[in-house]
Structure formats: structure tokens, C-alpha cells
Amino acid sequence: ARSIAIALADAGIVAINVACRKESAGQQLVERIRQTSAATATVTLLGGNSIAVEPETAVLVNATSLGATSPDTKLPLNVETFGSKLVVADVAYAASRTWLTHQAAERGCRIIDGLSLYVQQTALALNAWTGVMPDTVAMREAAEEFLGI
């Protein structure tokens, strides 16, 4: 979550809302974002209420452990507020679809699954180490086979 938030700020996202279970962890990330970028950052505590996604939101990223440990678990998000221009990413890579990516796809959002993120990150790392860009299609197929998805 930290790396993604900082990378989004570095890429020019002007406002970041960190939704988290622990206020202290969220506040630390918000302070880091404010120190390293011009982006504004706020914290929203995850609790019993569903969080509405503001219409101007461009990107929603789930970096909680729930996608990996319980991919079908409902997140406290009001999916009815997802606009069709929203890009939704879930970093969980052990399942082909999570509850979040399923809900986002049903609402016409562009989705980026965790396995795609993992493959691209690994390809970039291999390229940085070796100077050779690997075949990401073959990498994804191998990862799917290994994970049984």
C-alpha cells in the first residue's frame, strides 16, 4: 500500500485517500505522501459503514490482505458508487478474481488484477537486472499454472 500510494503521488495523482483499519498506520502514510509530493492526502477509517467512492475518483486500489486470504470477502465499499471510468486494482495475485474485481467488472470499470501487477513488477525487475525484457504472456501462463488458477 505504501509503495503504491507513493508511486501514484509521484505519477501526478493530486489527491489520495488512505482507507485503513488502524488510524496510526494511515496517518503515517499520509504524512509520508505529504512530505514527498504535492498531493493532498487524507485518512478514512474502515469500520462497519460502507465507503462511497467519490465520482471524481480515478483509481481505487485494494492492498489489504483480504484479497489474498479471502478473495470472496466483501469489502466495506459501496460498489453502487463506482463510476464506469474508475480503474480498480487488487494486489491479491493468488485468485483470478476477488470480490472487488468482480464487482468492479460488473459496473463497467477497468480492472487490474493482482497477478497482472505481479507479472509486470517481476518483468521490470528482471529487465533491470539482466537488460532483457521477458515474455510477460509466458510469465503469466506459468504463474497461473503454478497457482492453479
Image (spheres, grey):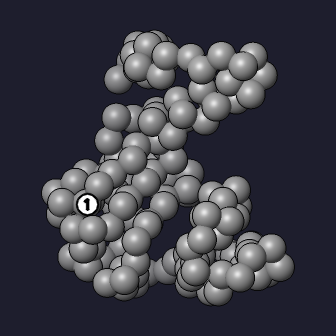
Between 74 and 89, the one nearer to me in the picture? 89
Find residue 34 and report its horizontal and vertical position in percent: 76, 82
Q: Quarter of the image holding residue 85?
A: bottom left
Residue placed under numbered mark 1 in the picture = 109
Who's the residue at 64% across and 31% down the image? 124
In the displayed structure, 140 sits above or below 11; it is above
Between 45 and 15, the one nearer to me in the picture? 15
Amino acid at pointer 1: Cys
Q: Is residue 52 visible?
A: no
Who's the residue at 45% across and 36% down the image? 116
Position of residue 147 in the picture relative to residue 109 (left or right): right
Find residue 48 and report its horizontal and vertical position in percent: 43, 81
In the displayed structure, 103 sits above or below 126; it is below
Find residue 26 and report its horizontal and vertical position in percent: 69, 76
Q: Is residue 56 visible?
A: yes
In the displayed structure, 31 sits above or below 5; it is below
Position of residue 119 in the picture relative to residue 89 (left or right): right
Q: Quarter of the image holding residue 42?
A: bottom right
Who's the residue at 39% across and 47% down the image? 112
Who's the residue at 22% across and 54% down the image? 105
